[in-house]
Image (tube, rainbow, N blue to C red):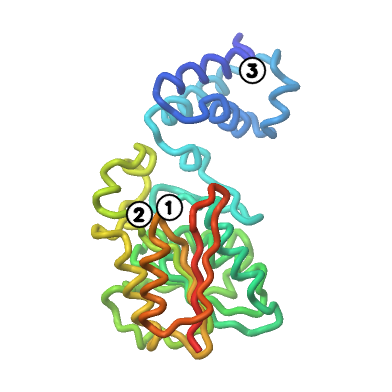
Amino acid sequence: MITVLEVIKLSTEYLQKKGVESPRANAEILLAEILKCKRLELYLAFDKPLAENEVQVYREAIRKRGLRIPLQYIVGNVEFYGLKLIVNENVLIPRPETELLVEKIINDSDKSNNLKILDIGVGSGNISLSISKNLPNSKVVAIDISKTALDVANQNAEINSLQDRIEFRLFDIMNDNLNSLGKFDLIVSNPPYVSENDYESLEPELKNHEPKIALTDNSNGISFYKHIIEASDQLLKKPGKIYFELGIDQSAQVQEYFKQNNFTNIKITKDYSGIERIICGELK
């Protein structure tokens, strides 16, 4: 029989050879998931032998990770801003940087206000759900071009008992009639911001498994920002705000779009790596 420690060591070596970043952490997280325990608890059970069925399930999980399938897709869920969310290959995996976007909106907003919010590109629902939970008087309209993404977002709303606060709509922000959406106090978006050129050099986890439609605009990476800001006359009440997550080196260009469209009080927030990651502008 193979023990917890032995299987972690073998799996770590295997994942390392496959080029997986943080191979030991990946091996431990997958094992903890299969044994239904916390990762720290593995350290108290190094000598525990694994049952044959546990070994088989774990071996399959490690094989998938070796193929560079993202850890979160193998596990099937992710934690985001205190919520547990289902994720699969129909939606982008929520990132810690996006928690900064959510946090900024919550901190900037008065919880007692009945805000009407538009979330463009809802994906797993991570932004809409965390805002709805923390701004309970708000009403969120969450749109996405992908029906399969909206299915996941709907599931996550039900799991977290937030389905009554969010209206999910299949909508193409670039081509559909904007007037049919109405006007909002606040617009938030984490749009596809990887340029067509940069997309080709992405890690296999991203390029081969996460939905391309959620990663790149198949252009210069900033077409969604430009379109949404230019559509603000139709979509935004006055005063109203737009919040975006940004890609690397995009803040100056997006800031310029805001200025060209009469936005003021433009604020940029850096992420944990010092990258200018969040931008907010106000239309008065």
Mark 3, residues whose alpha carbon is within 10 Å: few (<14), some, or many (≥20)? many
Quarter the N terminus occupies = top right
The residue under label 2 is 215
Which one is earlier in the sequence, the residue at label 1 or at label 3? 3
Q: Is mark 3 on a helix, strand or loop?
A: helix
State the residue in front, 68 or 259.
Answer: 259
Indicate the position of residue 82 as horizontal and vertical percent values: 66, 55
Q: How crowded is mark 2: few (under 14 residues within 10 Å), some or many (20 or more)?
A: many
Callout 3 amino acid: Val
Q: Which amino acid does label 2 sit on?
A: Leu
- How far apart are the alpha carbons under marks 2 and 3? 37 Å
Looking at marks 2 and 1 on the same chain, the residue that comes earlier in the sequence is marked by: 1
Of residue 268 and residue 119, the one placed in the foreground of this image is: 268
Asked if the residue under mark 1 is in contact with the one under mark 2, i.e. CB atoms within 8 Å, the reply is: yes
Q: Residue at x 43, y 52 (%)?
A: 92
Disc on the earlier residue, 2 or 3 = 3
Q: Distance between the residues labelled 2 and 1?
A: 8 Å
The residue lying toward the viewer, choosing from 249 and 145, is 249
Mark 1 belongs to which amino acid? Leu
Q: Name the residue under label 1.
A: 92
Observer able to see residue 141: no
Residue 178 seen anywhere in this rendered image of the structure: yes
Give the answer, above or below, for where 238 lies relative to 24. Answer: below
Q: Is residue 111 left or right of residue 245?
A: right
Tell me residue 78's x, y (percent).
Answer: 56, 47
Query: Horizontal placement of 233 versus 139: left or right?
Result: left
- Where in the figure is residue 159, as x and y percent of width and height? 60, 59
Residue that carries the numbered disc 3 in the rendered image = 4
Q: What separation in Å lies between label 1 and label 3 (alpha carbons)?
A: 32 Å
Residue 259 quadrant = bottom left
